[in-house]
Image: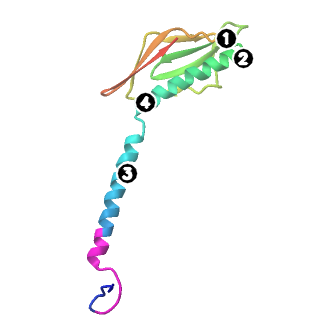
Amino acid sequence: MKILTSTTGSRSFTLIELLIALLIIGISASFATLSINNLRPTEAQALFKQLQNQLYQSQQSAQLKNLNLRLVIKNNQSIIEQLNPLTQEWLETSEIQALKWQDIILDSSESVINVSPSGYITPSILEIIAGDESYQLTTQ
């Protein structure tokens, strides 16, 4: 089998072959970038997951430490508060981080969701709306 060589006799790639190879690599990279961007969660999805985690952490903390906690939703943020048994005052707890959001509507059937040491959570429905996306988180 004879290997083709250029007119000068050297074995190398032509400019057209290199351009075609670069074009194929570029198209492959653009498809990879598009697929990676589609996998990134939207702000509404991220808030949904963060609220889920915040409720789960507060439930676990209430059960492990025998505390009365509550999730307060107001002014585009959700805060976990702890009941001080001596003064019967609700104080913000630093153990579970507060969540803040913008440009997302959070509609809740309850503005305060209580979490008891037995693990009971006030039944409520949290609806997260951002543009044409809508997610619903139900607590029981």
Q: Residues within 10 Å of mark 3 (few under 14, many from 20)?
A: few
Q: Looking at the image, tell me whether mark 4 or mark 1 is earlier in sequence order.
A: 4
Residue 113 drawn at (x, y percent): 53, 11
Say if the magenta span includes residue 65.
no
Q: Does the magenta portion include 12?
A: yes
Seen at 28% across and 78% down, the residue is: 15
Q: CA distance from mark 4 to mark 2?
A: 30 Å
Label disc, if present, on residue 65 of the rendered structure: 2
Depth-wise, is mark 3 or mark 2 nearer the camera?
A: 3
Mark 4 highlights which residue?
A: 45
Q: CA distance from mark 4 to mark 1?
A: 29 Å
Q: Measure the C-alpha gap from mark 2 to mark 1.
A: 8 Å
Q: Is residue 12 above or below residue 103?
A: below
To which residue does mark 3 refer?
33
- Which residue range is magenta in the image? 8-20
Q: CA distance from mark 1 to mark 3?
A: 46 Å
